[in-house]
Amino acid sequence: MKAKFFNTALLVSLLFGFTRFSTAQADLKTRNMKSQKVKAAYKKHWEGLRKNIASKGVSDQNFDFYIRVFKQEKKLEAWVKSSSTNNRYVLLRTYDVCASSGVLGPKRRQGDGQVPEGFYKIELLNPYCNYHLGMLVSYPNKSDIIKKTAPDAGNEIMIHGKCCTIGCIPMQDEPAEELYILCLEAMNRNRTVRCDIFPCRMSEQNMETLAKTNIPENKLFWKSIKPGYDFFELNHSLPKISITKKGEYLVTK
């Protein structure tokens, strides 16, 4: 869809408008508010989001933000918690993912049309995205690089607006604006925004359905990400994830 990213934050910022989360740079929110799209999004949504956050018993001035995506259900969950390691996440809102590409299963190469599956973070924000507003997911991660089936694993997977996609997570523009604001508020306070992508809600019934796949590698992969799903379902806190030399996920808690 677009050219590959350069490795330096400066070139990325100049060429694509992405702004990297970094304490060494100027205030992230200040720079984003130079975009008319971001300013308009704040005017439209921030007061309502603040009230919604406060209604969950969470400070709108100091919160952590977490995203979960379910491909089969086409749902994106937005979770918040007060910025303390002892607090549990609470569900803020659930949004519809308005389009999809590919099938259930992880992304393994450039051009396969797949939406990734696994444990990621929001790496960059693009207030000048061609798809309204863009939040770059940190694909490929170490696991994806180990397990890729071609020299190029692919890149530039975003949550974005405009409701169109080839491998991304597309939203209608207004949900994309709300998600962008929540990411920006958290990242502006040096908070990592985790973004975990699952094939579906990994209930026992759905796991039985997934087990019927004729792709053995996918069955093994889904078994490796289910403990991370289960940990959050039970604790409403994020598990610590490590990656083996074979690219498998391990929940280390």
Image: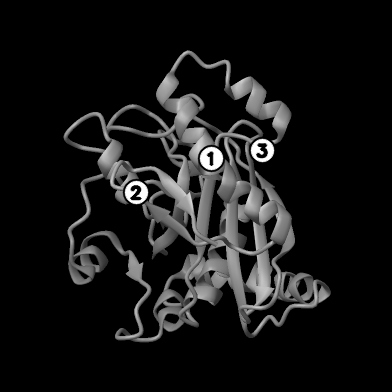
* Label 2 vs 3, first from the N-terminus: 3
In the image, what residue type sits under mark 2?
Thr
Examine the rendering and report whether any part of residue 105 can be seen: no
Asked whether 6 or 29 is in front, the reply is 6
* Label 2 vs 1, first from the N-terminus: 1
Nearest-to-viewer mark from 2 and 3:
2
* Gap between marks 2 and 3 measured at Cα: 24 Å
119 lies above or below 26: above
Q: Which residue is mark 3?
A: 201
Which quadrant, please, contains the C terminus?
Answer: bottom right
Asked whether 46 or 189 is in front, the reply is 189
Q: Which residue is mark 1?
A: 163
> Does the CB distance between marks 2 and 1 fall below 8 Å?
no
The residue sitting at 43% across, 20% down in the picture is 216
- Left or right placement of residue 68 versus residue 125 in this view: right
Mark 1 nearby-residue class (10 Å; few <14, some 14–19, many ≥20): some
Residue 156: percent from left, percent from top: 33, 48
* Label 1 vs 3, first from the N-terminus: 1
Say what secondary structure mark 2 lies in.
Answer: loop
Residue 109: percent from left, percent from top: 28, 32
* Gap between marks 1 and 3 measured at Cα: 22 Å
Say what secondary structure mark 1 lies in.
Answer: loop
Which quadrant, please, contains the N terminus?
Answer: top left
In the image, what residue type sits under mark 1?
Cys
Asked whether 96 or 71 is in front, the reply is 71
> Does the CB distance between marks 2 and 3 fall below 8 Å?
no
6 lies above or below 164: below
